[in-house]
Image (cartoon, rainbow, N blue to C red):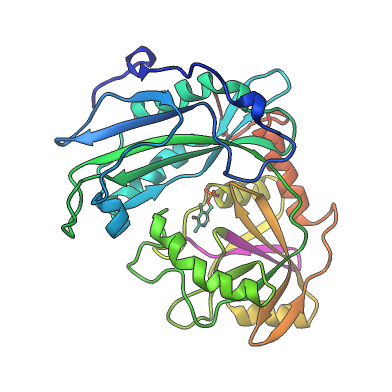
Amino acid sequence: MTKVSTHEIDIVKSKNTKIHDVDFDNLTFGRVFTDHMFYCDYIDGEWQQPKIEPYGPMSIDPSARVFHYGQAVFEGMKAYKDDHGDVFLFRPDENFARINKSAKRLAIPEFPKNYFFEGLTTLLNLDKAWVKSGEGNSLYIRPFVIATDSAIAAAPSDNYRFMIICSPAKAYYKGTVKVLIAEEYSRSANGGVGFAKAAGNYAAQFYPTSLAQNKGFQQVIWTDADTHTFLEEAGTMNVFFRIGDTLITAPTSDRILDGVTRKSLIQLADDNAIKCEVRPIKVQEIVEASKNGSLKEIFGAGTAAVISPISDFEYQNTIYNLPEINEHSYSSILKQKMLNIQHNLAEDKHGWRYEI
Ligand SMILES: *Cc1c(COP(=O)(O)O)cnc(C)c1O
């Protein structure tokens, strides 16, 4: 692995900034991008000179394998700015490890660690003004890799492009989230790619999710593909259940993505004397807990929303309601603890912040 220092990234700076055209109070998630993008090509068995250029369209051959076989993986992470103007990432080492774990499963070469961190740091320093301070404000960062070979043979590509693009984000109150428990479709299967952030996992979810949306639900809770009896993930988030005073979340496997938010919440629960069990959980268990009044909360966990509380779920044509969330709900307590660490407002005893 060749060492690259900041001055070894080829940088072409944008002549002017688009930042003044952006209404930061009314952002739609993922539509506006910062002034620069990072990329690095894999050619002849090696990652080439990394580059930063003004953000914009690029030219790719129509036969590029990413278009035909979906050989692509990605990550999702965020940068936060505190009131002093310092910018932090949250556990970026986890995202780095995961993009390479995903890449390996999709037969994509691993990306070097020094390029990843140099790329991120240099890009964020150039586009620092796009990270706004204040709770709920962040810069969403999207690293991804695509197969670029111009040849439609069904085999892994010889050439790839690794990129990082960034989009300013604001947390919105989404209202109540109703979910449908999957009884027909599946997100992932044993031996499959469910644990990887593979682009195709998302494409495969769109249709069943749109069917659920037509019935008035926002998301699907995915169950195991074999029996549809075990609860696995909520949409594109990990999922937690609170029965009595105990949180429960499924163990990770080749079907369940190993979320950074999930593992951080398990740790924060432990730090705050909230019991959290990591074990398989059946749909029947939450149905019964709902009937006897012990099901207190269900929430999704992921980088985009941190925690997304669920208000109702449907299973076998019956709707089950959850109690209303208040400031004592585990979802409220744990979300605030996470946000405080991310925004440099609380002690970081596990060393999760990474200053840019
Ligand atoms: C990205 C993702 C998550 C959440 O992971 P975080 O690291 O917490 O953002 C959960 N499930 C799926 C399927 C995902 O793609």
Q: Which residue is drawn at 51% across and 66% down?
A: 206
**Does the magenta-highlighted stretch encompass residue 71?**
no
**Residue drawn at point x = 36 percent, y = 31 percent:** 39
**Looking at the figure, which quarter contains the N terminus?**
top left
Quadrant containing the C terminus in the rendered view: top right
Which residues are drawn in magenta?
238-252
| Residue 281 visible | no
**Residue 159 appears anywhere in the view:** yes
Q: Is-magenta flag for residue 248? A: yes
Name the spot of residue 283 as percent of width and height, x first: 60, 79
Which secondary structure is most common in the magenta stretch? strand
> Relative to 317, is 58 on the left or the right?
left
Q: Residue at x 44, y 77 (%)?
A: 225
Residue 142, compared with residue 344, is above or below; it is below
Residue 128 on image: x %, y %: 58, 22
Q: Is residue 3 left or right of residue 211?
A: left
Question: Is residue 194 placed above or below 268 in the rendered structure?
Answer: below
